[in-house]
Amino acid sequence: MTYSLAIHGGAGTILKENITPEQEAAYHDALARALEAGEAILREWGSAMDAVEAAVCALEDEPLFNAGRGAVYTSEGAQEMDAAVMDGRDRRAGSVAGVFGPKNPVKLARAVMERTEHVTLIGPNALEIARQAGLEFGDRNYFFTQSRWDALQETLAMRARGEVSDDPARRHGTVGAVARDVAGNIAAATSTGGMTAKAPGRVGDTPMIGAGTFADNATCAVSATGHGEVFIRWNAAGEIAARMRHAGEDLATAADHVVMQDLAPNDGSGGVIAVDGAGNIAIPFNSQGMYRGSVRQGSAPETNIY
């Protein structure tokens, strides 16, 4: 039995012509650290759930990505974070939406799964679960990123002029991980700060089980990143599993169909990372790039952007 791990730091990346060698190196280094955080657990026969949580925590701690410490701002200058986890062994899941405070929203999503009878929590009670679980909290200074604040001001100024940006990085950005452990179990975790200048209270696909996050040992584990509203309407993550279950498609065929034929023609820019029960990995995307990485037992880790 072997393990597999894939991660993403969001689709709709910096345009290739605009990225500096220093920026590119920083992204590769951050992805490599997240891969190592997850693989370190899998190497020691740890669970897929522990591995995806660790990998996503590493990405949430990195201001380069739109999740946790690097979360973008709403139109009112606030930060609202969504996260989800799902265990392929029994389809247990936990998610939170619109939270601010916990340094690692993915840990709160797992706490919801393990400490409550519910799947999704929002508002003050979600934060109370975080306190009960002993999770670390950060303040506005901890979560402040100058580039995210500047992006908000630019987006608001464009709106005031009646302009619409064609930069996909402004409307989506997410982090996630999927894994298959040596016991043959799979899991998924996803976390996001949403869209730059989004309406307060807007919730994307990340915490919606079957849209942005899904895991079932019988089919696959999926973490999505992209135009959330479209991923919700096309039930993106769950549709990949459904095509495997009902149409008999393999992981690569099912994932490619959903990303390229369902999402792409319907303004669903973005991509997914997915792993099946045999440890096969699929990472299709229809945007110009997607921060991503993968590793399999016995192979060297890989990270890519474009």
Image (tube, helix red, strand yellow):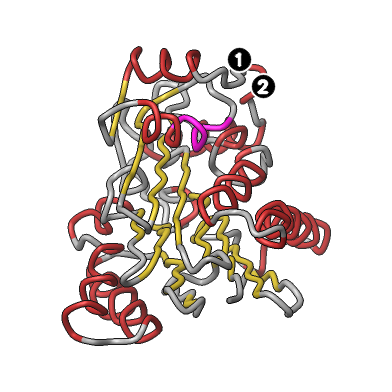
- Report which residue position mark 1 lands on: 139
Residue 188 picture location, percent across and down: 44, 55
Placement of the N terminus among the 4 image quadrants: bottom right
Query: What secondary structure is the stretch in magenta mostly built from?
Result: helix
| Marks 1 and 2 close (CB-CB < 8 Å) | yes
Amino acid type at mark 1: Asp
Q: Is residue 201 left or right of residue 173?
A: left
In this rendering, is residue 159 above or below 266?
A: above
Magenta segment range?
104-108
> In the image, residue 71 lies at what x, y percent?
54, 35
Q: Is residue 27 magenta?
A: no
Within 10 angstroms of label 1, few (less than 14), some, or many (20 or more) residues? few
Name the element at disc 1: loop
What residue do we see at 69% from left, 60% from top?
Answer: 39
> Which residue type does callout 2 highlight?
Tyr
Spatial CA span between label 1 and label 2: 5 Å
Q: Position of residue 42 (x, y in %)?
A: 65, 60
Question: Which residue, given by chain and number where applicable, does mark 2 sit on?
Answer: 142
Q: Nearer the viewer, residue 165 or 261?
A: 261
Q: Residues within 10 Å of mark 2 (few under 14, many from 20)?
A: few
- The correct choice, above or below, for 301 with respect to 31 in the image is below
Residue projecting furthest to the right: 22
Q: Quadrant of residue 287?
A: bottom left
Residue 38, percent from left and from top: 65, 55
For residue 242, above or below residue 120 = below
Q: Nearer the viewer, residue 295 or 76?
A: 295
Which residue occupies 38% across, 50% down? 86
Residue 255, picture quadrant: bottom left
